[in-house]
């Protein structure tokens, strides 16, 4: 295992005497200077790159300090909703499930950010890069710091054991379709039953890859049902793969609470379809000695795609300011810094794709990716569609996650699923504010 240089060693040493960081609902207590810095309360979830961003900001800003509340990722959305509804002491927070912004905006929890950005004297590059997912009713309500894109992450050793080419081979030949993905997944498990061809995680939105690439909205922003046929197509593929052990069972993942990173770390999964944040998790996995293989034995390439022109899916991850915060200017300075060049450099050093990378991002990201063509696929210009980004999105994702379980367990036919999902969507449209 090769040694890796981490950008923030010096910063962490400087901060270690003033910091409390524990697992679970942890808190990073910001140090105070003699001048009495403005201390903002900031909520996010447990991720190494998030902690690094906070630590770096605190180490380089004496007039503002971030007192971060770190919640477990698994139930972050639920806890955040409860905290916001109770108007807890939150000046700013990171949005994990982006469609939640619509409900937060309607309930008056989000501060419009247009005037703060205007006061900087220039457009925010991260917002401009993801304008369609940063604005509600003409108001900018979030500033992205991490870009949004899904990829195929693959284990080279698994493909070698199975005796078949890695996915980038098919990408280069224009053959990396969903049909080929299914074929390759089955071939891996057929070669060795101890190997799992592929895995897609339990989140409801993970069932909308093909729909998003096709431009389907599931439910349009004005409350009309769009085509659900690509949702059904992907769900049928998942069942076929699960039935032969070529895809990790969604039900087993839910019951055992097995995280996708653990699946991939253990070295028996051929392909993982997940977002742009995963290289950062691989860096942490190597650092913590969790990988059952060498760091160079994995790769990144495109998401399978049936469209004539390649398009991925995904939304950026960004930060919001609460409407009731009494420290909005300080909160804005922090989240604006995170989206800018300094924040992007920290994110890139963890292998994370910044929303506005800048010229230095490629070199920084390359240090934390395996050698070869992974960097080319990670940073290539690409279209990005996203299904289910609407005021109905959170409920659609939640309801779909439940209904798909019944289908995967064999408790309903395709026609029964289509009928039930359509009825559910109509109910959501009628009862959403």
Image (cartoon, helix red, strand yellow):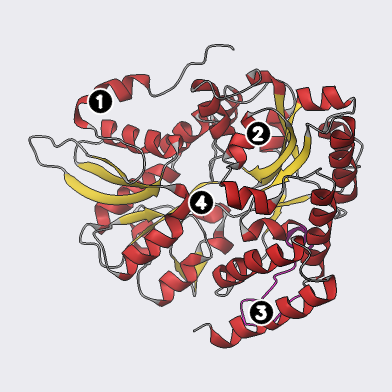
Which callout, 3 or 4, points at the residue further toward the start of the chain? 4
Residue named by callout 2: 264
Q: Dot 4 lies on which element?
A: strand
Residue picked out by circle 3:
425
Q: Hey, which quadrant is residue 172 in on the image?
A: top right
The one of 389 and 249 positioned closer to us in this rendering: 249
Of the image marks 4 and 2, the number of the one nearer the N terminus: 2
Label 4: few (<14), some or many (≥20) within 10 Å?
Answer: many
Q: Which residue is mark 1?
A: 16
Part of the protein shown in magenta: 210-227
- The part of the image, by quadrant, that contains residue 219 is bottom right
Q: In the displayed structure, does residue 412 sit left or right of residue 122?
A: right
Give the label, 1 or 2, closer to the camera. Answer: 2
Residue toward you, 279 or 409: 409
The quadrant of the image that shows the N terminus is top right
SS at mark 2 in the image: helix
């Amino acid at each position: 295992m090769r040694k890796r240089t981490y950008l923030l060693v010096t910063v962490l040493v400087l901060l270690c005497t003033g910091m409390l960081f524990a697992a679970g609902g942890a808190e990073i207590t910001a140090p105070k200077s003699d001048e009495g810095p403005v201390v903002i309360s900031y909520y996010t979830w447990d991720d190494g790159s998030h902690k690094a961003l906070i630590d770096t900001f605190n180490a380089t800003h004496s007039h503002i300090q971030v007192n971060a509340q770190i919640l477990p990722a698994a139930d972050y959305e639920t806890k955040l909703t409860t905290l916001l509804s109770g108007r807890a002491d939150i000046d700013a927070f990171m949005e994990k499930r982006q469609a939640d912004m619509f409900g937060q905006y309607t309930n008056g929890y989000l501060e419009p950010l247009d005037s703060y950005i205007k006061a900087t004297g220039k457009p925010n590059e991260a917002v401009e890069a993801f304008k369609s997912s940063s604005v509600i009713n003409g108001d900018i309500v979030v500033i992205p710091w991490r870009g949004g894109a899904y990829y195929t992450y693959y284990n080279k050793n698994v493909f070698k054991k199975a005796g078949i080419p890695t996915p980038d081979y098919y990408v280069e030949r224009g053959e990396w379709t969903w049909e080929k993905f299914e074929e390759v997944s089955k071939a891996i498990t057929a070669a060795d039953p101890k190997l799992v061809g592929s895995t897609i995680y339990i989140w409801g939105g993970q069932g909308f890859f093909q729909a998003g690439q096709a431009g389907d909205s599931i439910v349009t922003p004005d409350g009309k049902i769009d085509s659900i046929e690509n949702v059904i197509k992907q769900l049928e593929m998942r069942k076929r793969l699960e039935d032969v052990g070529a895809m990790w069972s969604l039900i087993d993942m839910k019951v055992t609470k097995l995280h996708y990173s653990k699946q991939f770390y253990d070295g028996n999964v051929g392909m993982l379809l997940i977002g742009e944040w995963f290289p950062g998790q691989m860096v942490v996995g190597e650092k913590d000695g969790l990988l059952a293989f060498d760091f160079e034995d994995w790769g990144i390439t495109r998401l399978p795609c049936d469209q004539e022109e390649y398009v991925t899916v995904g939304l950026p991850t960004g930060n919001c300011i609460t409407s009731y915060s009494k420290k909005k200017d300080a909160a804005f300075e922090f989240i604006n810094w995170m989206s800018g060049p300094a924040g992007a450099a920290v994110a890139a050093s963890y292998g994370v794709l910044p929303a506005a990378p800048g010229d230095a991002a490629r070199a920084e990201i390359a240090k934390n990716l395996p050698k070869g063509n992974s960097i080319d696929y990670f940073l290539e210009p690409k279209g990005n569609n996203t299904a289910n980004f609407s005021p109905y999105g959170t409920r659609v994702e939640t309801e779909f996650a439940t209904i798909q379980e019944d289908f995967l367990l064999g408790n309903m036919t395709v026609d029964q699923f289509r009928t039930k999902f359509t009825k559910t969507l109509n109910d959501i449209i009628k009862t959403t504010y």
